[in-house]
Image (spheres, rainbow, N blue to C red):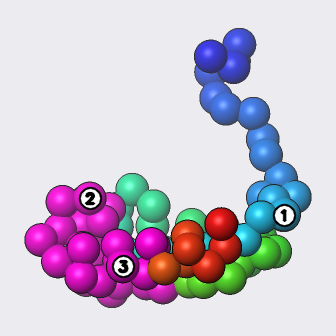
Amino acid sequence: MYNQTTPPFYKIEAITVPVAMWSGGQDWICQPMEIAQLRSQTTNLVYNKEFPDWTHWDFIWGIDAHQHAYKEILGLMEKYL
Protein backbone atom coordinates (compact mmCIF):
# COMPACT_ATOMS: atom_id res chain seq x y z
CA MET A 1 0.00 0.00 0.00
CA TYR A 2 2.79 2.46 0.88
CA ASN A 3 5.56 0.68 -1.05
CA GLN A 4 7.19 0.09 2.34
CA THR A 5 6.54 -2.15 5.33
CA THR A 6 5.27 0.65 7.59
CA PRO A 7 3.05 3.66 6.96
CA PRO A 8 4.89 6.89 6.21
CA PHE A 9 5.59 9.33 9.04
CA TYR A 10 2.89 11.97 9.38
CA LYS A 11 3.19 15.25 11.25
CA ILE A 12 0.29 15.17 13.68
CA GLU A 13 0.89 18.82 14.49
CA ALA A 14 0.14 19.67 10.84
CA ILE A 15 -3.53 18.69 11.22
CA THR A 16 -5.58 21.88 11.02
CA VAL A 17 -9.11 20.53 11.47
CA PRO A 18 -10.67 20.27 14.94
CA VAL A 19 -9.70 16.98 16.61
CA ALA A 20 -11.63 15.12 19.30
CA MET A 21 -10.02 12.26 21.17
CA TRP A 22 -11.53 9.47 23.26
CA SER A 23 -9.41 6.83 24.94
CA GLY A 24 -9.70 3.88 27.28
CA GLY A 25 -7.57 3.59 30.38
CA GLN A 26 -7.37 -0.21 30.03
CA ASP A 27 -6.56 -0.21 26.30
CA TRP A 28 -3.70 -2.57 25.47
CA ILE A 29 -3.63 -1.57 21.78
CA CYS A 30 -3.36 2.22 22.22
CA GLN A 31 -1.81 2.46 25.64
CA PRO A 32 -2.20 5.55 27.87
CA MET A 33 1.43 6.61 27.34
CA GLU A 34 0.94 6.58 23.56
CA ILE A 35 -2.33 8.50 23.90
CA ALA A 36 -0.59 11.12 26.06
CA GLN A 37 2.11 11.53 23.40
CA LEU A 38 -0.48 11.84 20.63
CA ARG A 39 -2.47 14.33 22.70
CA SER A 40 0.61 16.50 23.27
CA GLN A 41 1.31 16.60 19.51
CA THR A 42 -2.27 17.47 18.54
CA THR A 43 -2.37 21.23 18.15
CA ASN A 44 -6.07 21.60 17.39
CA LEU A 45 -7.54 19.36 20.09
CA VAL A 46 -11.07 20.56 20.87
CA TYR A 47 -12.20 17.66 23.06
CA ASN A 48 -10.52 14.91 25.04
CA LYS A 49 -12.04 12.25 27.27
CA GLU A 50 -10.68 9.09 28.86
CA PHE A 51 -12.86 6.25 30.08
CA PRO A 52 -10.65 4.74 32.82
CA ASP A 53 -12.24 1.27 32.74
CA TRP A 54 -12.61 0.88 28.98
CA THR A 55 -10.48 -1.19 26.63
CA HIS A 56 -10.01 -0.66 22.90
CA TRP A 57 -13.08 -2.75 22.08
CA ASP A 58 -15.48 -1.02 24.47
CA PHE A 59 -15.83 1.85 22.00
CA ILE A 60 -17.29 -0.56 19.44
CA TRP A 61 -18.81 -3.44 21.39
CA GLY A 62 -19.35 -1.92 24.83
CA ILE A 63 -22.96 -2.25 25.92
CA ASP A 64 -22.97 1.32 27.22
CA ALA A 65 -20.89 2.97 24.47
CA HIS A 66 -23.96 4.60 22.96
CA GLN A 67 -24.75 6.27 26.29
CA HIS A 68 -21.24 7.48 27.07
CA ALA A 69 -19.46 8.15 23.79
CA TYR A 70 -21.73 8.10 20.76
CA LYS A 71 -23.90 11.04 21.85
CA GLU A 72 -20.78 13.15 22.43
CA ILE A 73 -19.36 12.14 19.06
CA LEU A 74 -22.55 13.12 17.25
CA GLY A 75 -22.78 16.40 19.18
CA LEU A 76 -19.23 17.35 18.25
CA MET A 77 -19.85 16.43 14.62
CA GLU A 78 -22.87 18.74 14.58
CA LYS A 79 -20.84 21.52 16.17
CA TYR A 80 -17.75 21.33 13.94
CA LEU A 81 -19.04 20.03 10.60
**In the image, residue 65 lies at what x, y percent?**
24, 73
Q: Disc 1 residue type? A: Thr
Percent across and percent down for residue 79 are 62, 79
- Position of residue 74 measured from the top left corner of the image (x, y, whole percent): 45, 72
Three-letter amino acid code of the residue under disc 2: Ile
Please determine whether, in this image, residue 7 is positioned above or below residue 41. Answer: above
Please name the residue shown 77% across and 64% down the image.
Answer: 17
**Circle 2 residue:** 60
Mark 3 and mark 1: Cα distance apart in space: 24 Å
Compared to residue 62, the image places residue 40 above or below, namely: below
- Which residue is labeled 1 in the image? 16
Residue 69 shown left or right of residue 44 in the figure: left
Q: CA distance from mark 1 to mark 2?
A: 27 Å
Classify mark 3: helix, strand or loop. Answer: helix
User: Which residue carries the number 3 mark?
Assistant: 71
Seen from this angle, which residue lies furthest left? 63
Extent of the magenta region: 49-74
